Image (cartoon, helix red, strand yellow):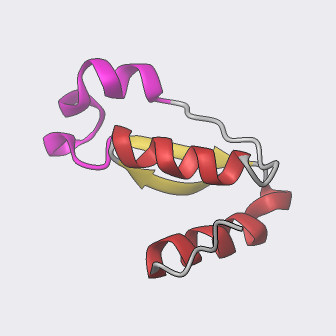
Amino acid sequence: MVDIFRGSVEETMIVINLLESEDIQVFVPNQLMASIEPIVVTSGGFNSVTLRIHEEYFEKAKNILDDYNNGSLSLD
């Protein structure tokens, strides 16, 4: 498993949906704690949720996230 994304609870929900729609299984190791007390998970509570995926999907997931971050994600 490798970390692929770190962000707020709201943004990680978007990223989870994007990845899972491409059949990439996502693991959220600190999801419960981040939603209860984000200040404890990371200093200041910023980027409190980490997403992990299997290494075999890293390149595919990275391309999806690059498109998402660049605003060029096609929803077709």
Query: In the visual, does 74 lie left or right of 49?
Result: right
Query: In the visual, does 44 lie left or right of 26?
Result: left
Quadrant position of residue 10: top left
Could you tell me if residue 9 is visible in this image?
Answer: yes
Name the residue: 67% across, 41% down.
26
Q: Is residue 31 magenta?
A: yes
Quadrant position of residue 73: bottom right
**Residue range of the region highlighted in magenta in the rendering:** 30-48
Outermost residue to the front = 76
Count of residue discs: 0
Outermost residue to the right = 56
Q: Is residue 2 above or below residue 76?
A: above
Q: Is residue 39 magenta?
A: yes
Could you tell me if residue 1 is visible in this image?
Answer: no
Q: Is residue 72 above or below residue 49?
A: below
Q: Position of residue 48 (x, y in %)?
A: 33, 41
Q: Position of residue 31 (x, y in %)?
A: 45, 27
Name the residue: 86% across, 59% down.
56
Outermost residue to the left = 44
Q: Position of residue 40 (x, y in %)?
A: 23, 28
Q: Which of 43 and 48 lies nearest the eye of the viewer?
A: 48
Q: Main secondary structure of the magenta part?
A: helix
Name the residue: 45% across, 46% down.
12
Q: Is residue 63 above or below residue 53?
A: below
Query: In the visual, does 29 lie left or right of 58?
Result: left
Name the residue: 49% across, 48% down.
14
Q: Is residue 51 above or below residue 38?
A: below
Q: Position of residue 76 (x, y in %)?
A: 72, 68
